[in-house]
Amino acid sequence: MKTITYKSNERGQANFGWLQSSHTFSFGQYFNPDRVNFGLLRVFNDDIVVGGAGFPTHPHDNMEIVSIPLKGALAHLDSTGTEQVIKADEVQIMSAGSGLTHSEYNASKSDEVNFLQIWVFPKEKDIKPRYDQKYFSPEGRINKIQTVVAPSDTDALWINQDAWFSLCDLEASKSVKYVTNKEDHGIFTFVVEGAIEIASEYLDKRDAIGVSGKAEIQITSQANSQLLIIEVPMN
């Protein structure tokens, strides 16, 4: 088993006034040769955007992009003709495929929006660009794993990769076991809120850990905790 921890205070930082972004992996002007990716998980950004601001229209191609609002609402517009607003307890996925443009703005003029933007390398290149989003009830993840993104689960959002995204709200002193769908996959766990123990490591709010070479992991909460678990191929 191999583990790598990503402490919150070690993340790359970008502050543009309207945007405060924390990068777990190298992104933009932040580059760390030891923090480029975890398997096929390439980008993991924790973004806070002030009211009325956002990312103007820009292009993407051949990347699976998942956005998960933690607080507030995010307005999305893209060249597929999709115009949507996503909120907490909703998950958005966009297959950039052969190429598209999109913009993302804070849907509020006054309140901040905090969301996770995550990029995964695709399984098949140059597919037709696509967009989807879905609401997931928080009751479905209390002390258990709730799969929200998967390559072959009708209850989850589809992704063009052998990758699984899961949410879990663990009450204090509770444990869950995560078992990989494929033995050679890695497990990346991010602590949205709270504190946990995993693979003999203690993690606090906004810390993360990548575990590879092990088909299952046990997660125990030290306090009421919210988790995001991402399973990805390692090559």
Image: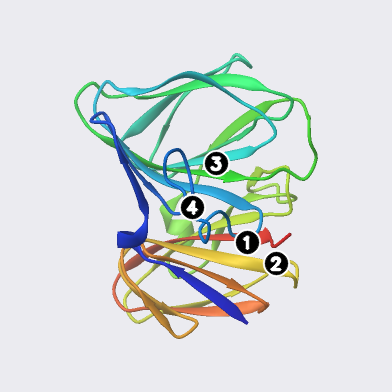
Corner quadrant of residue 30: top left
Q: Which residue position holds label 4?
A: 25
Say left or right for 70 vs 58: left
Q: Of marks 4 and 3, which one's residue comes earlier in the chain?
A: 4
> Is there CB contact under 8 Å for labels 4 and 2?
no
Label 4 or label 2, whichever lies nearer to me, is 4
- Residue 194, disc: none
Instruction: Name the amino acid type tagged 4.
Output: Phe
Q: Residue at x 68, y 45 (%)?
A: 121
Say left or right for 160 vs 205: right
Label 4 or label 1, whichever lies nearer to me, is 4
Q: Of marks 1 and 2, which one's residue comes earlier in the chain?
A: 2
Cα–Cα gap, marks 4 and 1: 16 Å
Q: Of marks 2 and 3, which one's residue comes earlier in the chain?
A: 3
Q: Nearer the viewer, residue 105 or 224?
A: 105
Say left or right for 136 vs 80: left
Q: How is the image coloured?
A: rainbow
Label 4 or label 3, whichever lies nearer to me, is 4
Residue 206 visible in the picture: no
Around disc 4, counting alpha carbons within 10 Å, would you say few (fewer than 14), some (14 to 19), or many (20 or more)?
many
Cα–Cα gap, marks 2 and 3: 19 Å
Q: Of marks 4 and 1, which one's residue comes earlier in the chain?
A: 4
Instruction: Name the amino acid type tagged 3.
Output: Val
Image location (x, y in percent) of residue 4: 51, 72
- Residue 185, disc: 2
Helix, strand, or loop for circle 4? loop
- Residue 66, disc: 3
Image location (x, y in percent) of residue 189: 49, 65
